[in-house]
Amino acid sequence: MWDFSTMSSIHHVLVTCTKILPSFHRSLKNWSMSLIWLENKLHFECLVNLTKIQLWHLGFCNWNYTPTYRGFDSFLGMYSGAEDYYTHVTGYSPHSGYDFRFNKSVYYEVKGEYSANVFARRAIDIINSVNPKKESLFLYVPFQSVHEPVQVPKKYEDIYSHIQNKTRRTYCGMVSALDEAIGNITDALTHRGYMDNLLLIFTSDNGGPVNHGANNWPLRGSKNTLWEGGTKGAAFVYSKTLLKKTKYVNTEMFHVVDWFPTLLSVAGGRSDPGLDGIDQWPTIQSGAPSKRSNFVYNIDEIMKNAAIRVGDYKLIEGKPGTHNGWYPAPNNHRKHFRNQTTFHDIGALEYQLFNIKSDPTEHFNLAKKLPDVLKKLQLYLQEFKKTLVPAFYPPGDPKSNPKYYNGTWSPGWC
């Protein structure tokens, strides 16, 4: 029996995968700016070998923005997102191209191979190359699974042949393929003797997209929304030796920006002042009360919406997103499961207020019933907005077109 603690109740992530990545690496929310990177701190302060496998999604117009120049000793994966799991092509014609790198080199050797298998194999190679008795290792493996496009080898889809809906059936198969890949990695860790001094963290980057086969029931909403279904991520932490309290569900407040100082603390490093993240190691290790009492879900100047959490209360300003309803789990896997993922127009509500502790599914808007609480959270939100970096969302640069780089997505155009 593995000794792990589950962080499923109040582990919050961000609305999309692109937004979560800078939060993890820098411990600052996606509207902040910093030159501090977790990888740099681990590498130079803690003497840790650093390997990144798979998704980058943090810009690549210049080589200095790629993982190779952001502190990682090695990198295998793609710079962008939503690429084909087999061809590793992403984008839309005529602006599409091959996107797979081994360090700086375009890596064609894996063309046609399912990405989860590629990433697991690379992780295992790294594990087998490091001596756990002499070297420390930070292995960061953000799998492509289960992002769209919804694709998986047939043998995994066939496990769920009783599910009539094709998208849902394939999605479930993708989860099984991911599970097998992670199992192969943990087997390698066990074989090499890492399990005696290991901290294993599994988490998601955002809620599931209900229009691509995912399901967040009973939580409300989907990926790309401010609802709990789009922003609450399941997570667990495992260690044979480092956790004092195990086999329980931790319900303390935790945000993705907290991973930076927490992991740095475990590795023996020190966080710099001014970070949004909080060292939550006592909470993870022994179940101590969280040091966090509030956080920001998102503030989007372009979409004109925002959401914050203060204590038990959550404030949403503006329209939370597109999928605003509740999408029941497909208990009988009925053929028309996709019909449930309809759009719900919630009208032009300027503010919505929810007590997430007593109403985690966000059914009861308390904005009119609790005007004092509403006012308090509005003031909190205004203070957070004062820290905003101005939104910068320029149009696509035609110089990035893969046709100028032998059909590949490549740095060198800024």
Image (cartoon, rainbow, N blue to C red):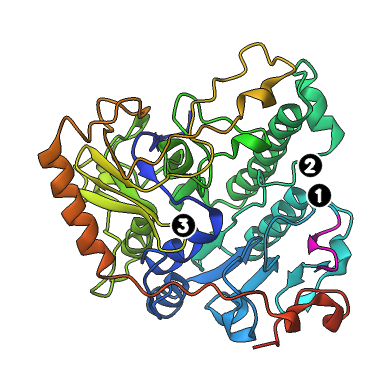
What span is colored magenta in the figure? Answer: 87-96
Q: Could you tell me if residue 132 is visible in this image?
A: no
Task: Look at discs 3 and 1 and give the one toward the viewer.
Answer: 3
Q: Is residue 245 above or below residue 403?
A: above
**Magenta portion: prevailing SS class:** strand
Q: In which image quadrant can residue 100 be found?
A: bottom right
Residue type at mark 3 is Met
Q: Which residue was labeled with disc 1?
A: 114
Instruction: Give me the C-alpha separation between circle 3 and circle 1.
Output: 35 Å
Residue beneath the point at 14% across and 47% down: 375
Q: Is residue 237 above or below residue 62?
A: above
How many residues crowd mark 1 within 10 Å: few (<14), some (14–19), many (20+)? some
Rendered location of residue 227, percent (x, y): 42, 39
Instruction: Give me the C-alpha separation between circle 3 and circle 2.
Output: 30 Å
Q: Secondary structure at mark 3?
A: loop
Q: Which residue was labeled with disc 3?
A: 303
| Quarter of the image with the C terminus in it | bottom right
Residue type at mark 2 is Gln
Q: Residue furthest front?
A: 348
Q: Earlier in the sequence, mark 2 or mark 1?
A: 1
Q: Which residue was labeled with disc 2?
A: 151
